[in-house]
Image: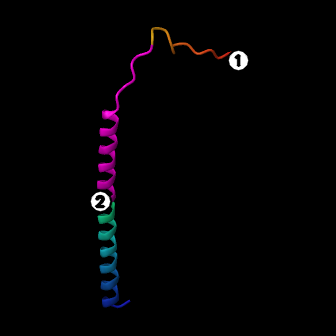
Amino acid sequence: MNISALSTAISQGTVQQQASLAMTKKTMNAMEQTGQAVLQLLQSVALPPPLAEGIGKNIDVYA
């Protein structure tokens, strides 16, 4: 293998690695923004009022 072909192959590998890293960073940023939006949505939801005493504490497993 000659020097110029080797240099070209290394250069292409470096460019591919940089492109892959850039896409990974973009994906991570998008996921972080999505996570923050979900967290804000969960925090904005009002909790239902508590149930009356004793309701929902026992489950009848006999049918």
The amino acid pointed to by label 1 is Ala
Q: Can you say which quadrant of the picture contains the N terminus?
A: bottom left
Q: Residues within 10 Å of mark 2 (few under 14, many from 20)?
A: few
At horizontal 30% and vertical 74% (from top left) the residue drawn is 14
* Magenta span of residues: 26-51
Identify the main secondary structure in magenta. Answer: helix
- Where residue 51 sits: x, y (%)? 44, 15
Residue nearest the observer in this picture, 38 or 2: 38
Q: Image height check: is 35 above or below 26?
A: above
Q: Image height check: is 34 above or below 62?
A: below
- Where residue 37 sits: x, y (%)? 31, 44
Q: Which residue is mark 1?
A: 63
Q: Is residue 34 covered in magenta?
A: yes
The residue tagged with tag 1: helix, strand or loop? loop
Of the two numbered discs 1 and 2 on the same chain, state the one appearing first in sequence. 2
Q: Residues within 10 Å of mark 1 (few under 14, many from 20)?
A: few
The answer to whether the residues at label 1 and label 2 have Cβ atoms under 8 Å apart is: no
* Image-based side of 63 in relation to 47, left or right: right
The residue tagged with tag 2: helix, strand or loop? helix
Outermost residue, right direction? Answer: 63
Q: Which residue is mark 2?
A: 25
